[in-house]
Image (cartoon, rainbow, N blue to C red):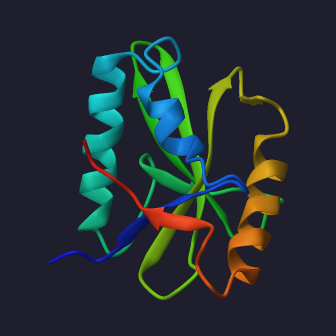
């Protein structure tokens, strides 16, 4: 049984930055993408997320980082539990190097997008995540 429905943030033009990032083979090689999708599928069926797969971000209430390591690269998908119960919205993709996000403002962008999604009662700023 699925515990979570994964959603992707859509920008104001309707573009899906999560899928664009995952499809960019320069940023996310094919095997890394496969591992990211596998971890996301694992989390879909997991009620309580814990390290090393996911953790709450200190100083950014509500923001969760999904943590994937592949070939010494630390991929991070920032998101939050919402907008509805049992939904998790992927907000911003990033990397982590030397305990710092790349880009450094990734958590701030995720916070901004979380506020946008929460205020979007028509649900025009999200779509269901595609696992392919």
Residue sitting at 41 percent across and 82 percent down?
86
Q: Where residue 39 sits in the image (x, y, percent)?
A: 31, 46
Indicate left or right for 117 with 45 as reference.
right
In the figure, 29 relative to 110: above or below? above
Farthest-out residue, front: 13
Of residue 125 and residue 86, the one placed in the foreground of this image is 125
Tally of numbered discs = 0
The picture places residue 40, in percent across and down from the top left corner, at 34, 51
Q: Residue furthest left?
A: 1
Instruction: Indicate the quadrant containing the C terminus: top left, top right, bottom left or bottom right.
Output: top left
> Residue at point 43% right, 60% down?
50
Give the left or right position of residue 1, taking residue 42 as reference. left
Taking 47 as reference, is 57 left or right? Answer: right
Q: Is residue 16 above or below residue 89?
A: above
Quadrant showing the N terminus: bottom left
Q: Quadrant of residue 64?
A: bottom right
The residue depicted at 76 percent of the width and 41 percent of the height is 106
Residue occupying the point 77% across, 29% down: 103
Say if 128 sits above or below 47 in the image: above
């Amino acid at each position: 049984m699925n515990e979570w429905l994964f959603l992707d943030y859509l920008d104001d033009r309707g573009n899906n930055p999560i899928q664009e990032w995952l499809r960019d083979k320069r940023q996310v090689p094919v095997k890394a993408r496969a591992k990211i999708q596998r971890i996301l599928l694992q989390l879909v069926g997991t009620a309580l997320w814990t390290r090393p797969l996911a953790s709450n971000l200190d100083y950014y209430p509500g923001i969760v980082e999904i943590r994937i390591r592949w070939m010494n690269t630390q991929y991070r998908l920032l998101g939050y539990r919402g907008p509805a119960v049992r939904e998790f919205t992927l907000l911003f993709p990033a990397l982590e190097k030397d305990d710092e996000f790349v880009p450094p403002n990734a958590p701030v962008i995720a916070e901004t997008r979380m506020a946008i999604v929460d205020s979007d009662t028509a649900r025009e700023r999200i779509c269901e995540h595609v696992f392919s």
